[in-house]
Amino acid sequence: MASSSAPLLTHLEAEDTSSTLTFDTIVEQSLSDFGLRQILQIMFIGLAFTFDSMQIFITVFTDAYPTWHCLDHTICNSDSTNMCGLPRSAWDWDNDFKGKSVISEFDLECSSSFLRGLPTSAFYMGSIVGGVLLSTIPDGFLGRKQLLFLSTSTMSVTGISIFFSSNIWSYVFLKFLVGFARSQTCTYALVLISERVSTRWRPRATMIPFTLFVLGFMSLSGIAYLARHASWRVLYLCTSVPAAVHSIFLLFFALESPRWLHLQGMNQEAIEVLKRISPETRAYLESVSSRLLQQQETPEQAPRYTIKDLFIRNWAFRRIMVVMIIMFGLGMSYYGVPLAVRDIKLSIYLSESLNAMVELPSFVITPILLERFNRRSSVLVNALVGGASGVLCFFLSLFGRTKIAFALELVSFLCARIGFNLMAVYIVELFPTCVRNCAMTMLRQALVVGGACCPIIASVGRHVPSLSFAVFGFAMSGFGLFVLLLPETKGSSLCDTMEAQELRDQALKISPSC
């Protein structure tokens, strides 16, 4: 092992001696391989995506309409009669169990679509408010790991509290708090992961947490099926308690982002993290650490950046606005399609499980697109295909072609997932380390705003069958066209400061006003 690694280290040292030493060079060289230790750390951090997905989609099961049956068959037929036109004594919920769903326990079966969709909308509104307020936290505050711990622990504790909600209004309030708490969970986790791998491995590494997100969705369907005879409150306990345990482990065993440590002037700590991530390059890191420490700025000398820098620099403002427009359309499709699929007459457990399973191919397709094609064309073609599938799903469902319509719904949902994957990697490359958390926050804000529109649109679909699929399809394809306004970033390394980003764009002959 020693003899095989010696030529590599000699080559790395010679390369750094002959060129200007930068921290980006050290990261790229020391993390040039993608070993088991890195994969395990990424999976460990990526579990935050798993629990986040459970909180996002849990209302599909907890707020669903339970089945019911007639008690007085002289005036009631459960296949054709609207329960709201019957006296309460003429019908009852199946298994005589009122606590199966929020709808039945809080007597919302005949309420307006607005009130029935209010808990889900409150969750998304909490995500929006949390995203706005938490985005004002500078990237230099606490660190990636500490912010991730605070987000996951607060989300899980609030989720556990839902078990004790006594009425619809306390439930809506707690859903708002859960949305607020988890608003930055995936942002912190994804940025932490993307800053700990080299440019070569970034497309594949960032797909690991997204895969775990889908596994969370799939496991939620399984948990909901096993708990189908229990109270809806049990589902919140089954998802929130493991999330609380994971957040504690994050605090003690997750590693901080070396790029963030470097930006804070803590170069020695950054080198130590790199040694733990990639022990094979320890000798190389020790050889360059002294040179790096000589160049170290004091915390007072290091420039400070906030979310304001995204708006006062023209190139950054234009980029973030275009990204948010695209993500708004993707958010409507990604969060709306699983809600609208209830209008297609299939088992809710089967349809949601298939929606979760169809996401898995996206994590194979996305790295292929990122490695073989440029960013803009991949996002554009994907948006057009997904939008067309949603519109066709609407027309086919009108003519009763349920199976084909459901297949097209799966295609539309898959494209929404791929689009989000592509944009998540794209935005990491569009903005430097100093504002990357803030930029990712704005991306997810637009995604959540799109999702907040979905419950109302999906409720309309109960009166105009599958109309919501057409709305989601037009949103995905129409807003996806804006990607043509973004610069291409394929193959580019990450910058740490706004000034470095501008210099790199100029060197690549990309106008900062793009």
Image (cartoon, rainbow, N blue to C red):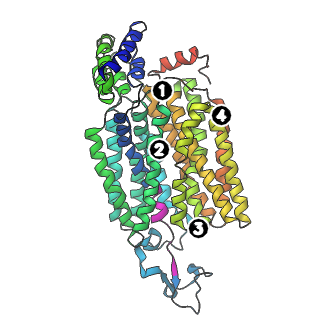
Q: How many marks on residues?
A: 4
- Residue at the spot 42% in from the left edge and 40% down from the top edge: 133
Measured along the vertical axis of the image, is residue 301 above or below residue 33? above
Apparent side of residue 503 relative to residue 174 in the rendered image (left or right): right
Q: In this view of the protein, can residue 209 be seen by the observer?
A: yes
- Residue kind at label 1, given as amino acid type: Thr
Real-space CA distance between mark 3 and mark 4, rounded to the nearest whole angstrom = 35 Å
Residue on which disc 1 sits: 199
x%, y% of residue 102? 44, 68
Residue on which disc 2 sits: 210
Numbered label attached to residue 377 = 4
x%, y% of residue 86? 56, 84
Does the magenta portion include 77? no
First of labels 1, 4 by sequence position: 1
Give 286 or 20, whichever is nearer the viewer: 286
- Magenta extent: 57-68
- Residue at the spot 52% in from the left edge and 83% down from the top edge: 69
- Residue kind at label 3, given as amino acid type: Leu
First of labels 1, 3 by sequence position: 1
Numbered label attached to residue 478 = none
Apparent side of residue 311 relative to residue 373 in the rendered image (left or right): left
First of labels 2, 3 by sequence position: 2
What is the residue that sits farthest to the left in this orientation?
Answer: 252
Around disc 3, counting alpha carbons within 10 Å, would you say few (fewer than 14), some (14 to 19), or many (20 or more)?
Answer: some
